[in-house]
Every structure is written in structure tokens, then in C-alpha cells.
Amino acid sequence: MASLTVPTRFALAVTAVLLSASPTAAFTHYEDDGSCQIVGDTDIYGVGVRVGYYLTFFAGVLAVGFNNSKGTTDSLKAVNTIFSAILIVLIRNAALGSFAVLEWQIATVLVFLLPLASLLITFMLGGPGLASWGAFFILYGLYAALQPWLFWTLLEQGRDLACPSIRMFIYAPFDFYNPIYVKFIRAMSIISCVSAPLPIIGGCYLIGSSMKGRRTLRETSISRRIKEAKAEVAGSDIDLDMVKRSGLTRVVMVIAILFGGCAGIVSVERVISLNSIDLTEVGFLSTGQLIPFLVGLFTFISTAWSIITNSDDD
């Protein structure tokens, strides 16, 4: 442990606490009294977990907007910490008979789409921390590989046909069990599973590169080979440093990220509201809510502080 940095130790400690804690609430299910009331799992999308992810997202936006590598690294570690715990809880709940598709649809926006909005752009521009990026892509690959299991074998699990169909929200409400949408998500789950080995293999490669002392994507052997190949074609190389320094480019990126991210946040909140999901069994001060919230809060504060003080890893 002596070689681990303080943020890494903190992330590992938080993950251990989250995974060792007993479930604070039952998995997503209908009440047994025939009321069609859906009780949600606060471990996955309780208010503390959601706010923690939202704060991490906005920290990532700040990092992109101000070209702050330390903020990106902090956001990435926070995402990996919470994502690891939520993925395990999702699998556990599905195996125990939860209303799986509802849980996973909400979690997809929180743990899959929101982080991608800001972090992937930073990665492409050469963000530091290859080991953390490797873990990030491996988690995404595992999540993608599980999609056929969810949408082909668990589609009806937990559903009560006597109750109204669950509602989703993508710019407008719609019936989740609409045949067209079901066909779409099943097709996408196959594509997702087939594509899953790519991020897993890429993640392993990044971790291996990190073990060799490389910090950013541009320092890896693959990146150097691509750069050498581009250099042979006049005018084909893109100066990423120029892109990173361009104020106008960053403004456009931030606007695009904010639009996509805020649309995702609205989608999550509307799905919870449309289906009247009860998340009151566990309070905000419970361990399962407070830790993800604090991870997100400290990530946001750390990012803002590093920007204010011009503290960066580069």
C-alpha cells in the first residue's frame, strides 16, 4: 500500500465500505399490498447516489472547460468507485429477483452515459492516469457484456401485469414495454455485448501501459505508431495541444456536454417521478447515501480548488 497515492487509498477504502455494507433497502419491487406502488433500491439510485453522480459529472465539466488534468483524474476515480459498487448491487439484485429492467434503465444513465459525456472527450485529448482509465473501460465493457442477459432473459422479471406499465423518458414519456422500444433495446444489447471485448481489452492495455510508467494515451506505443503513420501523410496530423488550448473549442465542448448531461439528469428524475418510485425507506444520512454523496462533493470541491489555485498535474 505504500506505493498507492492518497486519492487511490481513499477510493479503495470507500469501495470496501460500500461493498461490505449490508443492503439498506430491498431491491426494486412492487409493494405486496396490491397498490402497484414501486419501492426503489436506494443503493442504486437513492438521492445521495444520484447527487453524488451529478456532482461528479459537473466536476468533469469544469475539468474539461478549464483544461484541468487533476480535476479529470479526481472525477475519474470517483466514477470508478461508485460504478464498481453499483454494478455489483445491480447484479446481486437481478439475481435475487428485482424489477431488473427498471433498475438498470435508471442506472444506465447514471453510471454509463453521464460519465461518458465529459470523461471520454478528456481521454481522447490525452488525460492522465492510464490505470484509472483502464479500470474505467473494463467496467464499461463488463456492463455492456451483461446487456443481453438483462433484456433477453430478465425483461419480464419483477413486472406486475395488473399494474400500469412502467414509463421511460427521453425528451418525452413513453411506455417501456412498447414493442418497438423492446426490439430496439434488445438489438442494442446484442451490439453492446459484441462490442464489449474492445473496452475490456483496451482497459487491460492501458493498465499494462501504466505499469510501464506511461501516464497519458499519447505516451502509449499504439499512440506513437498512429502518430508516426500520420506524419507520413502531409497535413493529416491533428495538433491535440492546439485543440486543448483553444478557448472556442472548449466552450463548444462544454455546451455540448452540459446539454447531453442535463438531458440525462432530467431523464432519471422524470422516470422516478413518472413511476412514483418510493425511495423513502432509507434516509439521506444512511451510509449507502452519504458516502456516494461525499465522494461526489469532495470531487467537485477538489476540482474547483485545483482550478482556482491553478494546481494541475501537467
Image (spheres, rainbow, N blue to C red):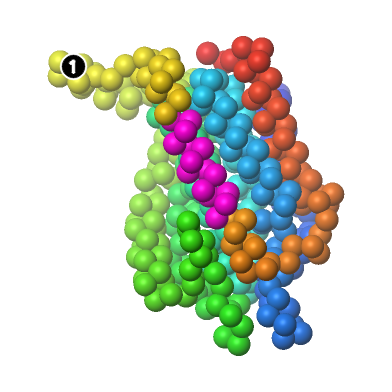
Q: Nearer the viewer, residue 210 or 26?
A: 26
**Which one is nearer the viewer's eye here, 158 or 224?**
158
Image height check: is 176 above or below 71? below
- Above or below — where is 3 with respect to 189? above
Q: Residue at x 72, y 86 (%)?
A: 34
The answer, for residue 181, to whether it is visible in the render is yes
The residue at 44%/57% (across/down) is: 145
Q: Is residue 106 magenta?
A: no
- Magenta stretch containing residue 259, yes or no? yes
Q: Residue furthest front?
A: 172
Q: Residue at x 26, y 25 (%)?
A: 226
User: Which residue lies at the image location 47% right of the left edge and 33% below the top edge?
Assistant: 255
Nearer the observer, 67 or 81: 67
The quarter of the image holding the N terminus is top right
Is residue 297 positioned above or below 138 on the image? above
Q: Is residue 106 above or below residue 64?
A: below
The x, y position of residue 30, in whole percent, is: 68, 77
- Left/right placement of residue 141 relative to residue 272 reads left
Q: Badge 1: few (under 14), some or many (20 or more) residues near its Cα, within 10 Å?
A: few
Numbered disc total: 1
Disc 1 residue type? Gly
Quadrant of res 132 = top right
Q: Residue 10 at x, y = what percent?
A: 72, 33
Q: Secondary structure at mark 1?
A: loop
Q: Residues in magenta?
A: 253-267
Which image quadrant for residue 243? top left
User: On the image, numbered disc 1 is attached to which residue?
Assistant: 235
Looking at the picture, how far across and down is residue 87, in whole percent?
59, 54
Instruction: Kindly tell me whether residue 208 is visible in this rendering.
Output: no
Instruction: Return the x and y of residue 27 as percentages of the image width and height.
Output: 69, 67
- Secondary structure mostly seen in magenta is helix
